[in-house]
Every structure is written in C-alpha cells, then in structure tokens.
Image: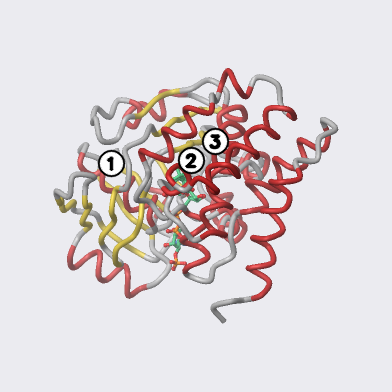
Amino acid sequence: MNVAIIGAGAVGQLTASFLAESGMSVTLVARRQGQADELNAKYLTRVNVDGAKTVQKVVSTTKLKGLPQQDLIVIAVKYGQLQELYGHLSSLPSTVSLLFMQNGLAHYDEALRLPQKNIAFSSVSFGAQMIDQSTVQHRGVGVCKIAVERGDSGAFNDLLQIKNSLFPVELVANAEQMLFEKAVFNCLINPLTAILQVRNGELVTNKHAFLLMQTIYQELTEAFEGIEQAMPFLKVIELCEKTASNTSSMLADRIHGRKSEIDTIAGVILEKALANGHDLPTLRTLYHQVLAIEESGERR
Ligand SMILES: NC(=O)C1=CN([C@@H]2O[C@H](COP(=O)(O)OP(=O)(O)OC[C@H]3O[C@@H](n4cnc5c(N)ncnc54)[C@H](OP(=O)(O)O)[C@@H]3O)[C@@H](O)[C@H]2O)C=CC1
Ligand SMILES: CC(C)(CO)C(=O)C(=O)O
C-alpha cells in the first residue's frame, strides 16, 4: 500500500515510522525543504518507549502534487493548518482515501465536505514528541482508534491489520463520539499542561494540578451524560501516567510560540456544554488563560 502522510511533525513521524515498519511504502510530506532533505538523507528515527531506536526508510517531499498515486493520505497537521490543505485535498481523485488525525472536533464537518469516497478519522492516545527534524520519540504507547465515517472500511484494511504491540490499532463505530471522548480527555490534560508548563505525568503527582483536573472532570460529568461510564476518571489518570513524560501537543505549541488547538478542543466542548445549560467555569477559565498566553505573544 502506498501511503502519504502530510505533516512531518510528532504524530506524522511516529505514524510514518510504524506504517513503514509494517511494510507500507510511506511518503512523508514536510513543509520545509530542509526537513525533507534531512529525512531523505538520514531516514526516520524512532526512539521507542524503552529507549531502543529504529530507523525506517521513508521518502520525503514538500510537493503535494505527486500525491494522486497514493492509496491513502493521512493528514497529520494541526487543526489550524488544515484550512490551507482543504483546497488541495479536494482536487485529488475521489478514489484516494483520507484519514484525519487531529485532536478536537471542529474538523469533523469540514473534512466531510471533501469529495473523496472514503473518509476516516483517527483519535490517538499515544504520546509523541519530535527530538529533531528526523527523529521522533514515542512517549507513551496508546491506541490508534480509527472510525470510517464515509465509504468502505476495506480501504483502511492495511492500517487496521497492523499487528504491533507498540502501535495498537482499533476500528471503532462512531467517529463523532470517538472525537468527542478524546476532546474530553484533552480538555482535562492539554490546557493545564500548557498553562502550568508541566508534562502529562505531573497532573497526577502534583496535588494542586490534580485537584484542578478533578474539578474540570466534575464539571464535565455534570454537563454531559455518560462521561463517568465512557471515560471513568481512572482512565484519565491512566492516560496521564502512560504519557507521563510527554509534552502535550498544547504545551509543545506554547514552547514553540505556535497557535494552539484550544478552540477545536475546549472551545467546542464549552459550546456543547452551554447548549446543555452548563457553563464549566474552571474549563472556561483555562480556555481564556490559554488564549491570553497566545495573545501576549510571549515568544515573539
Ligand atoms: N504530539 C502528541 O503527543 C499528540 C498529538 N495529537 C494531535 O495530532 C495532531 C498533530 O499534532 P503534532 O504532530 O503534535 O503537531 P506538530 O506541530 O508536531 O506537527 C504538525 C506538522 O505539520 C506540518 N505542516 C503544517 N502544514 C503543513 C502543510 N501544508 N504541508 C506539510 N506539512 C505541514 C508542520 O510543519 P512545520 O513544522 O514546518 O510547521 C509540522 O511538522 C494535532 O491535532 C494534535 O492535537 C494527538 C495525540 C498526541
Ligand atoms: C494523548 C495526549 C494527551 C498525549 O499528550 C494528547 O492527545 C496530546 O498531547 O494532544
């Protein structure tokens, strides 16, 4: 299977590495020529959770034009970077299958406006962090859930059949529910880690951070039915512990002075809660704090 992954960041590189390891022919689309050159020269190094290194051969390019020959295109850019890609994706043949790997919910309706026959969404609970332009560190094993929202799930079979305990893949039925549940986890972890500038594990070991996380969880359970059953608080603790050494994607954005995904994660959850008559004051405070940090342009 020929797969192109757009976005040679943390998630794009980690996914590319496991797909290449499973025998797929992987093209990694980077934005910068310097990064593509480095990936072509050195290939892609993955540092596993136990510290072992593996180097996978991938081809890298900055050109989106060659992509029609691909069977599958995985989109692994941040939510805010999707807008400039939609035009290009819509010009690809309708037979190319698309898999979106973003956290949050705002991309769900947007992606389904594309003309492709097979469109799937993924929600991942692994941790991934870039070490340099061609090296990614796996910072916590977690499931890569895939929900095929339109078309034939057979188009994603090669992915679904990957057998690697470091990269478990699972087919789930309802994409919107899957993205909602992941956004709830991200509301509990990402803003706090970004504001406090701590790794995920510290949300459990720091008693004040833990209290804040518990308070947000309480607010969420009051606003949405079924959270305690689908996402017991123990699972939140487990995700923090499994990805303990990870710099959450929102903290990584703060460190690099990039715009965060707060709107597609907390913004959408706050809107949904309000529609149910709940204001979520603690989460709302964190939401505005993340936006205030961004507006201050602390790294500019
Ligand atoms: N990191 C993590 O642990 C996890 C992340 N996620 C989610 O995965 C998604 C991706 O996050 P993550 O990998 O961390 O983000 P990164 O910022 O590490 O990676 C995004 C990459 O996309 C590249 N890019 C942006 N626009 C384009 C374009 N038009 N063409 C080619 N490349 C492009 C960026 O290039 P450049 O650097 O040049 O801007 C960057 O390398 C997010 O939605 C995040 O929330 C989910 C679970 C875990
Ligand atoms: C799984 C987790 C919490 C890993 O850090 C993540 O989704 C993120 O960082 O955005």
Residue at point 41%, 64% (across, down): 63
The x, y position of residue 267, in whole percent, is: 71, 48
Residue at point 20%, 41% (across, down): 21
Give the crowd class for mark 1: few <14, some 14-19, many >=20 residues within 10 Å.
many
Assess mark 3: CB under 8 A from ligand 2?
A: yes
Q: Quadrant of the N terminus?
A: top left
Quadrant in the picture for residue 88: bottom right
The x, y position of residue 22, in whole percent, is: 22, 36
Q: Real-space Cα distance between discs 2 and 1?
A: 15 Å
Disc 3 marks a residue whose amino acid type is Lys
Q: Which of marks 1 and 2 precedes in the sequence?
A: 1
Q: Which of marks 2 and 3 precedes in the sequence?
A: 2
Query: Residue 98, labelled with which disc?
Result: 2
Give the crowd class for mark 2: few <14, some 14-19, many >=20 residues within 10 Å.
many
Query: Residue 244, labelled with which disc?
Result: none
Q: Real-space Cα distance between discs 3 and 2?
A: 20 Å
Taking the image as shown, residue 242 lies to the left or right of residue 262, namely left
Q: Name the residue under label 1.
A: 19
Q: Name the residue under label 3.
A: 182
